Amino acid sequence: MSSIPEFDGSIVPVRVGVHFTRPDIRTIRRAVGGFLSASLKSLAMWQAKRASRRILRDLTDAELEDIGVTRAEARAEVSKSFFWD
């Protein structure tokens, strides 16, 4: 009697290798278009943040008080990098 279990004889074929198909031009255009669209949206968002931070920077203490923001909070927001959320 052996300590090795008995083999029942069923063998499952294994597929080796990956079949690569070349993407068509429409797939490439969609990928590039999606990338460009996302990039332009990010750029527009960064520009909007930059503009609003410049406006915030120029507000007076009374205007900041009206919107419920302290000078320190405004300074912290204005000092953020352009890509900061």
Image (tube, rainbow, N blue to C red):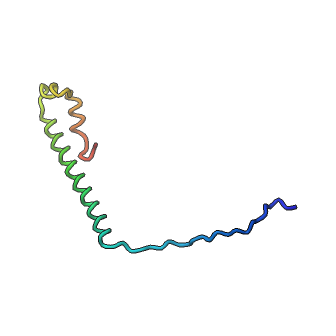
Q: Is residue 60 left or right of residue 46?
A: left
Viewport quadrant of the N terminus: bottom right
Q: Is residue 48 above or below residue 27?
A: above
Looking at this view, is 39 or 56 the one in front? Answer: 39
From what the image shows, is residue 70 above or below residue 55?
above
Q: Residue 3 appears in which quarter of the rendering?
A: bottom right
Q: Where does the image place residue 77, in percent across and percent down from the top left?
A: 23, 36
> Is 9 positioned to the left or the right of 50 in the image?
right
Q: From what the image shows, is residue 33 above or below residue 18?
A: above
Look at the picture and state if 25 lies above or below 75.
below
Depth check: give the residue in front, 75 or 25: 25
The extreme right residue here reads: 1
Residue 2 locus on image (x, y percent): 85, 61
Q: Position of residue 10 (x, y in %)?
A: 70, 68
Q: Residue at x 26, y 47 (%)?
A: 83
Q: Which quarter shows the C terminus?
A: top left
Where residue 9 sits, quadrant-wise, is bottom right
Residue drawn 20% across the image and 33% down it: 74
